[in-house]
Image (spheres, helix red, strand yellow):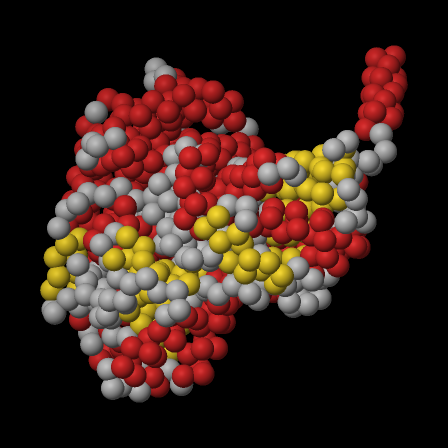
């Protein structure tokens, strides 16, 4: 471990590589986590199938790639397809569990996650897949830092998508309805908002956001039917750290998590890369607990 | 209340009827057919290779039946395999093998796909004292437990990449450098198979006094090794060794390309299974990939002819194969061993058949087969192939090499 830290201090240029890799992948984490924050905050559904939605989006982009269509077109395609899919899942399943207790929705979405992973496995096989953008790769500092253009493009698109969602939530009628429902569903219903439709839209929007994140992940990382769970865990870590209504928090936590993973992998070894995520969650929960206790004392 | 009682009665009588109809366990040899049993992965994460293995078994059975079948006690028998899908989970493998033994009465077995499922199978074989010839479980931990009924036709996993170490030493010495100056970077998945591969590499690196500068273990859900590769850039090793099944090969090849990793020698397992040449093109040139078998090797037997003949027949029989995976070739070899073992034992007694297997010495299109007392095949070496212009050419060991090795590799 100390050897690895020594490398970073002796040749700081490698910090740039780790930071960039972390930020690029962290942006897609943040996107998927924002979808989860939306569903969790508005509907109080903890969607364990989050990562599997991400994988579905990835497979849509990858599949288009195999058909000779550039996988970047997979981004709009997976947004549209996953929106429709999310709506269908809401109507068939989520609507029935939304007013039940927490465990019912957890179990239902966990079941959905298993079904989706197995369905992807049956359709596309268990191999790891990547969608090739064929964009050039730049190198700097005598090849010590390399940046694939597709990662820059994906980073930009993540930013654009996040901006689009924010503007939508602020300015559109549906966005306002979603925010009203999140604040007080009963009051929103009294005011004439069709909350069932709001829920359906929110869930579908989440699926679409996940689909977009997945399409980008298939181009900058790898996808596999059973990798959904690790993306679900990341989303939960980010939302737990940032809170629901806090988009800047989600973005910061997402990017931070990406960077943490890279440093965790570099310093402690690749086997601890994902363990870093879980350790972080634990840390956040402990810290939250302490903070809340302090808050309670002040109130008393 | 009445309905409940009626239901209980009906289900009880159905259960009894089921028991009676399933009858005594006599299915090991039905008429003139010998039934071999196998619980193998048709679904789940091992399904691709599971199906490769099944095709191998089927081709072996087809060929033997075509050539007149198996002669035991002056009578000829046909072979047939009874399969169950173990869904790629070891627990299921164990359950299904129990079922094959207890309910279907099968006494002779072909292996599942993967070391993990074979590990679950071995104790069942011991418990019922029925032999299994397996072709897809290479972990060396299968052969240090004293199992008596488990035999493997393939080379064990610690041999997979060890040859890359001796090749690196050979090249260093040729260039006037000492083998002990070589810096090795390794990244292995944290699973039984890959850790065995690692043990073999470590052992050989130690033998030459090489310095291991990176020794990372990759997680099971491995989708990123860029932090390891950043370390590779910083420490500039002479040899990079990677192993983590197909996903490790795919992830590794992709990120090696993306990060323009410039190491003179890169060796990894599962290149072919992960189809890295078609996915990542010229960037994979000069990668070294071990294989159990290649169609260019000069092995031959009386059933299939040469390795190349087997290759041709396989492609003709099963559509959609551009290359014949070694997983299929070794599966076929396991079926050939069964035939020879039955004929050698000249009996269906499981103990006699087991003893016959343990004393078998044969040449096949897949290579020599002779089992050590532990049950692994000691007659066949691993070969190392290099990707040269998108083709896999055998470069080591020198006895089997068809092409000289390209060194040093330059990033493309």
Residue B412 visible in the snapshot: yes
Image side of residue A13 versus residue B284, left or right: left
Residue B124 visible in the snapshot: no
Say if B362 sits above or below B169 in the image: above
Q: Which of B363 and B56 is in front in this view?
A: B363
User: Which quadrant, please, contains the N terminus of chain B?
Assistant: top right
Say if A115 sits above or below A290 in the image: above
**Residue A115 placed where, x, y %?**
50, 32
Q: Write the residue at 45% across / 83% down.
A: B207
**Residue B262 placed where, x, y %?**
21, 67
Q: Which of A126 and B21 is in front in this view?
A: B21
Q: Residue furthest top?
A: B2
Count of numbered marks:
0
Q: Write the residue at 77% across / 42% down.
A: B74
Q: Which of B367 and B351 is in front in this view?
A: B367
- The picture quadrant where one finds residue B362 is bottom right
**Residue B251 placed where, x, y %?**
33, 53
**Residue B51 placed where, x, y %?**
51, 39
Q: Nearer the viewer, residue A158 or A100?
A: A158
Q: Write the residue at 17% across / 59% down.
A: B412
- The picture quadrant where one finds residue B166 is bottom left
Q: Write the residue at 23% across / 70% down.
A: B407
Say if B67 sits above or below A259 in the image: above
Image side of residue A152 versus residue B310, left or right: left
């Amino acid at each position: 471990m100390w050897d690895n830290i020594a490398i970073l201090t002796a040749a700081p240029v490698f910090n740039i590589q780790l930071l960039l890799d972390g930020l690029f992948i962290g942006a897609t984490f943040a996107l998927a986590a924002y979808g989860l924050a939306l569903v969790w905050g508005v509907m109080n559904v903890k969607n364990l199938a989050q990562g599997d939605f991400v994988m579905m989006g990835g497979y849509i982009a990858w599949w288009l790639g195999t058909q000779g269509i550039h996988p970047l077109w997979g981004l709009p395609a997976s947004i549209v397809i996953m929106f429709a899919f999310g709506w269908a899942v809401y109507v068939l399943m989520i609507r029935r569990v939304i007013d039940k207790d927490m465990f019912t929705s957890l179990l239902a979405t966990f079941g959905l996650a298993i079904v989706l992973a197995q369905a992807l496995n049956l359709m596309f096989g268990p191999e790891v897949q990547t969608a090739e953008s064929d964009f050039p790769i730049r190198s700097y500092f005598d090849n010590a830092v390399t940046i694939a253009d597709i990662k820059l493009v994906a980073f930009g698109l993540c930013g654009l998508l996040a901006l689009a969602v924010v503007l939508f939530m602020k300015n559109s009628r549906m966005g306002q309805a979603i925010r009203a429902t999140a604040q007080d569903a009963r009051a929103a219903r009294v005011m004439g908002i069709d909350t069932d439709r709001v829920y359906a839209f929110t869930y579908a929007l989440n699926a679409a956001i996940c689909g977009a994140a997945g399409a980008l992940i298939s181009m900058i990382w790898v996808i596999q039917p059973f990798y959904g769970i690790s993306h679900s865990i990341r989303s939960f870590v980010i939302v737990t750290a940032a809170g629901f209504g806090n988009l800047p928090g989600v973005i910061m936590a997402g990017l931070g998590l990406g960077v943490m993973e890279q440093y965790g992998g570099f310093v402690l070894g690749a086997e601890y890369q994902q363990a870093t995520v879980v350790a972080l969650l634990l840390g956040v929960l402990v810290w939250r607990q302490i903070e809340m206790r302090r808050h309670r004392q002040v109130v008393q | 209340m009445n309905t409940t009682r009626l239901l209980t009665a009906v289900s009880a009588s159905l259960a009894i009827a089921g028991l009676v109809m399933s009858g005594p366990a006599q299915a090991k040899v039905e008429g003139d057919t010998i039934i071999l049993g196998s619980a193998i992965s048709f679904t789940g994460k091992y399904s691709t290779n599971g199906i490769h293995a099944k095709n191998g078994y089927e081709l072996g059975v087809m060929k033997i039946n075509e050539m007149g079948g198996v002669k035991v006690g002056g009578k000829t028998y046909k072979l047939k395999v009874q399969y169950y899908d173990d869904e790629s989970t070891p627990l299921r493998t164990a359950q299904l093998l129990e079922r094959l033994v207890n309910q279907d009465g099968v006494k002779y077995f072909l292996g599942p796909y993967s070391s993990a499922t074979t590990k679950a199978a071995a104790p069942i074989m011991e418990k019922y004292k029925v032999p299994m010839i397996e072709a897809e479980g290479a972990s060396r931990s299968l052969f240090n437990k004293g199992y008596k009924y488990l035999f493997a036709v393939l080379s064990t996993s610690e041999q997979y990449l060890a040859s890359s170490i001796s090749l690196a030493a050979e090249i260093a010495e040729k260039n006037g450098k000492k083998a002990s100056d070589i810096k090795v970077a390794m990244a292995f998945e944290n699973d039984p198979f890959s850790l065995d591969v690692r043990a073999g590499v470590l052992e050989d690196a130690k033998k030459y006094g090489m310095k291991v500068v990176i020794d990372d273990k990759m997680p099971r859900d491995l989708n990123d090794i860029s932090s390891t590769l950043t370390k590779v850039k910083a420490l500039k090793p002479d040899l990079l060794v990677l192993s983590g099944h197909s996903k490790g090969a795919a992830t590794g090849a992709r990120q090696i390309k993306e990060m323009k990793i410039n190491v003179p020698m890169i060796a990894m397992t599962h290149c072919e299974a992960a189809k890295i040449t078609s996915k990542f093109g010229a960037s994979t040139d000069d990668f070294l990939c071990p294989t159990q078998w290649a169609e260019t090797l000069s092995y031959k037997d009386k059933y299939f002819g040469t390795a190349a003949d087997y290759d041709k027949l396989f492609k003709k029989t099963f559509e959609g194969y551009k290359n014949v995976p070694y997983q299929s070739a070794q599966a076929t070899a396991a079926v050939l061993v069964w035939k020879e073992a039955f004929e050698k034992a000249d009996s269906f007694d499981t103990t006699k058949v087991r003893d016959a297997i343990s004393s078998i010495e044969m040449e096949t299109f897949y290579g020599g087969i002779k089992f050590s007392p532990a049950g692994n095949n000691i007659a066949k070496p691993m070969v190392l192939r290099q990707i040269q212009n998108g083709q896999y050419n055998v470069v080591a060991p020198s006895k089997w090499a068809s092409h000289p090795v390209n060194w040093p590799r330059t990033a493309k």
